[in-house]
Image (cartoon, rainbow, N blue to C red):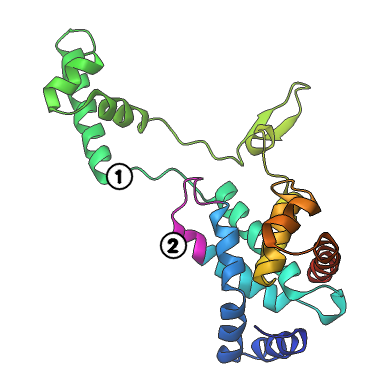
């Protein structure tokens, strides 16, 4: 793991185009990148795409980082990567429809138009499914794929009839500052030794008392208290 001084030196070299320095920084922060990516894995973007976006944010962080910021590079890195991923999901992350569904959608559309021209009613989902030997869920998906895709940056109106982008109306479970803090805390905890990690997890995630932890670890409560305090100081410095 790179020290603060080594990190700064690598950033200086990376800004000058040193690929080895960039690689060192990337390797040193790989676990952090993966932690961030995991937060977005279930939001409709492939892991490889997320990784590429994280790398773009990573390179931007290197280019924009200033030693006078008085923050660790890893602390500066997290919001840069999150911002890059969220920007993509907001502006470019459209729903991708498979070729099979597109072909089925085209065939269904031709079939429906032919029925209408014959003066017949538009076929039901079940009739279409039987016609093309597919599941009714596939028919629904194919029909749905014909609808225009709305971008989250499209403009609508709020209750006060003022223009507002669609993404601003969506409820968000993740406050960005909280997300950054969670990722940085996870990284800081992972850097502790095994006993320090266990005490923090038992104390603050499983809500156990110092006495219960001491009994579980086979040490005195005084020792647990001492380790807990020193570990909290370490975490504060890393954050």
Q: Which residue is mark 1?
A: 98
Q: CA distance from mark 1 to mark 2?
A: 18 Å
Residue 110 on image: x %, y % = 19, 27
Residue 184 seen in this snapshot: yes
Q: Which residue is mark 2?
A: 48
Above or below, 28 against 114 in this view is below
Image disc number at residue 46: none
The mark closer to the camera, 1 or 2, is: 2
Report the magenta residues as a range. 40-51
Above or below, 145 against 177 in this view is above
Residue 56 seen in this snapshot: no
Along the line of sight, the residue nearer the viewer: 149 or 82: 82
Residue 228 on image: x %, y % = 81, 63
Along the line of sight, the residue nearer the viewer: 98 or 115: 98
Q: Earlier in the sequence, mark 1 or mark 2?
A: 2
Write down the quadrant of residue 21 in the picture.
Answer: bottom right
Is 87 a magenta residue?
no
Along the line of sight, the residue nearer the viewer: 23 or 218: 218
Q: Residues within 10 Å of mark 1 (few under 14, many from 20)?
A: few
Secondary structure under the numbered disc 2 in the rendered image: helix
Is 47 a magenta residue?
yes
Image quadrant holding the N terminus, namely: bottom right
Secondary structure under the numbered disc 1 in the rendered image: loop
Residue 85 on image: x %, y % = 59, 56
């Amino acid at each position: 793991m790179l020290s603060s001084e080594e990190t700064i030196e690598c950033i200086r070299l990376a800004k000058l185009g040193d690929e080895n320095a960039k690689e060192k920084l990337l390797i040193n922060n790989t676990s952090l990148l993966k932690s961030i990516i995991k937060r977005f894995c279930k939001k409709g973007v492939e892991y490889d795409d997320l990784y590429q976006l994280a790398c773009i944010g990573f390179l931007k962080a290197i280019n924009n980082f200033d030693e006078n910021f008085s923050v660790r590079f890893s602390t500066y890195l997290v919001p840069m990567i999150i911002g890059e991923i969220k920007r993509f999901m907001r502006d470019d992350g459209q729903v991708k429809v498979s070729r099979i569904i597109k072909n089925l959608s085209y065939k269904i559309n031709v079939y429906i138009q032919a029925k209408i021209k014959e003066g017949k009613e538009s076929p039901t989902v079940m009739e279409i499914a039987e016609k093309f030997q597919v599941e009714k869920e596939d028919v629904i998906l194919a029909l749905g794929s014909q609808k225009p895709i709305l971008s989250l940056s499209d403009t609508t109106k709020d209750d006060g009839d003022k223009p507002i982008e669609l993404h601003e109306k969506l409820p968000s479970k993740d406050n960005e500052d909280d997300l950054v803090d969670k990722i940085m805390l996870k990284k800081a905890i992972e850097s502790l030794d095994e006993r320090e990690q266990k005490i923090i997890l038992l104390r603050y995630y499983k809500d156990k008392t110092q006495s219960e932890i001491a009994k579980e670890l086979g040490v005195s409560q005084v020792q647990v208290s001492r380790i807990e305090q020193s570990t909290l100081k370490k975490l504060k410095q890393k954050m």
